[in-house]
Image (tube, rainbow, N blue to C red):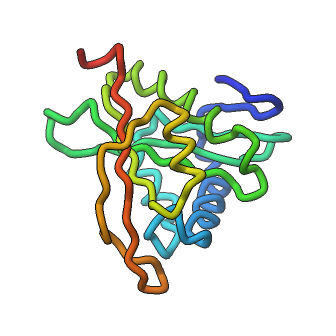
Amino acid sequence: MSSAGDVKIEPMTEADGPAVLEIYGQGIAAGNATFETVVPAWRAWHASHRRDCRFVARLDQRVVGWTAVARYSSREAYAGVAWESIYVAAAARGRGVGLALLQTLIPATEAVGIWTLIAGVQANNPASIALHERAGFRRIGVQERIGRDPTGQWRDVLLFERRSPTVGG
């Protein structure tokens, strides 16, 4: 558990589900955080993310951001690789919430043997690009015209990775 100023970072609980999905919905509405167009049901979201590496940011006891990881692949060779997701409520952006979340997530993933975190960030999302770079991720490539936004416009996704200096050799 850590905090950035008055922001408190804690493990995510089932009770946080509605707030997590609401913030995810804000990311969908923004049009530069995901290609998803519909907020999933909590059951589907819950099933697709590791339970041991999920955190929420609270401000005045209210969830204002979250981060979680999902398996990169079902192959055993990739057991230490995970996709990282991070979302911050519109009203809490620019307050260090994202960095505080990643600074909590990174050691938690290393503690469970994850040696590489991967993130896909839309090229038209400069705040997320800067956040990942500040948190020690490096840009490893560009997936050009990989997905379409809800208006049908093709978008590029920048791929980032953060390799643990302590896990996986």
Left of 32 or right of it: where is 121? left
76 vs 81, nearest the viewer = 81
Q: Is residue 84 above or below residue 22?
A: above
Name the residue at 47% across, 64% down: 34
Image coordinates of residue 163 in percent, x first then y, are 33, 28
41 vs 10, nearest the viewer = 10
Quadrant hosting residue 36: bottom left
Q: Quadrant of the C terminus?
A: top left
Quadrant hosting residue 103: top right
Q: Is residue 33 above or below residue 108?
A: below
Quadrant hosting residue 91: bottom right
Image coordinates of residue 167 in percent, x first then y, are 31, 17
Identity of the residue furthest to the right in this view: 60
Q: Is residue 152 above or below residue 140?
A: below
Name the residue at 29% across, 60% down: 143
Left of 4 or right of it: where is 32? left
Image coordinates of residue 110 in percent, x first then y, are 40, 22
Left of 96 or right of it: where is 157? left
Image coordinates of residue 106 in percent, x first then y, are 48, 27
Q: Quadrant of the N terminus?
A: top right
